[in-house]
C-alpha cells in the first residue's frame, strides 16, 4: 500500500500535520499511526469533529489493511457546515453519478460504487462520519444544528451559534 512513497514525503507530511491538526489530537494520532493514508491536500479538522474524523480515518485504515486495497484520503474539511472527506480507492469499482446530498446553498453529486466493493464500504465510512458531524458543534462537539453566521454556514451548538467572533 503505497510502499514506494519516499520517506522524505512522509516526513514532510508529518511536519505539516502537526501544524494543521494542533487542535485535533485524535486525528493527528490516527494519521501518525497510518502515514500512507494521507491527506495529500491541505486539510482542516474543527476541534469538535476531531473524534469523528479520527474514527473514520482509523476505519478506512482497517478497511485498507483488511482488503489489501490502497485507500488514500485526498482531503477533509468543513464546507457549508458539513464534513467533506475526499477518498481515493485503488480499485476499479466506479459506478454512475449519484446524488450525494444538499444544503441550503449547494447540491452534491459523486460517482457511485459497485455494490459490495471496497469503494462502497469506504464511502459508507465517510458518509457515516459526515452524518455524525452534521449533529456536532464544529467548535466543541456538543449537540448542534446548521446555522448561518454572517453568511457562513456552520454546524454550531446554541452557545457557539450566538457568538459572533468564531
Image: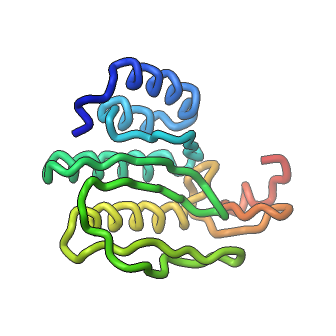
Position of 104 with respect to 133 (left or right) is: right
Image quadrant occupied by the N terminus: top left
State whether residue 156 is above or below residue 42.
Answer: below
State whether residue 62 is above or below residue 32.
Answer: below
Quarter of the image where one finds residue 38:
top left
Position of 155 with respect to 35 (left or right) is: right
Q: Look at 55% across and 66% down and name the residue there.
A: 134
Q: How has the structure been colored for display?
A: rainbow
Tell which of 98 and 142 is nearer to you: 98
Q: Look at 24% across and 59% down and name the residue there.
A: 91
Residue 26: x and y, percent? 42, 38
State whether residue 143 is above or below residue 107.
Answer: above
Tell which of 21 and 165 is nearer to you: 21
Tell which of 108 and 124 is nearer to you: 108
Residue 64: x and y, percent? 22, 49
Position of 152 with respect to 97 (left or right) is: right
Q: Look at 55% across and 45% down and name the residue there.
A: 45
Residue 128: x and y, percent? 39, 66
Residue 166: x and y, percent? 77, 47
Badge count: 0
Amino acid at each position: 500500500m503505497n510502499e514506494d512513497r519516499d520517506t522524505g514525503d512522509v516526513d514532510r507530511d508529518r511536519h505539516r500535520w502537526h501544524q494543521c491538526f494542533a487542535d485535533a489530537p485524535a486525528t493527528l494520532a490516527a494519521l501518525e499511526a497510518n502515514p500512507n493514508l494521507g491527506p495529500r491536500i491541505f486539510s482542516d479538522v474543527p476541534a469538535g469533529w476531531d473524534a469523528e474524523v479520527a474514527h473514520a480515518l482509523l476505519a478506512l485504515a482497517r478497511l485498507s489493511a483488511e482488503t489489501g486495497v490502497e485507500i488514500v484520503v485526498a482531503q477533509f474539511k468543513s464546507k457549508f457546515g458539513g464534513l467533506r472527506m475526499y477518498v481515493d480507492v485503488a480499485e476499479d469499482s466506479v459506478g454512475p453519478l449519484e446524488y450525494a446530498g444538499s444544503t441550503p446553498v449547494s447540491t452534491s453529486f459523486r460517482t457511485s460504487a459497485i455494490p459490495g466493493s471496497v469503494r462502497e464500504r469506504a464511502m459508507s465510512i465517510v458518509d457515516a462520519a459526515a452524518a455524525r458531524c452534521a449533529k456536532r458543534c464544529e467548535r466543541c462537539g456538543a449537540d448542534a444544528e446548521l446555522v448561518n453566521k454572517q453568511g457562513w454556514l456552520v454546524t454550531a451548538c446554541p452557545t457557539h451559534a450566538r457568538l459572533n467572533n468564531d
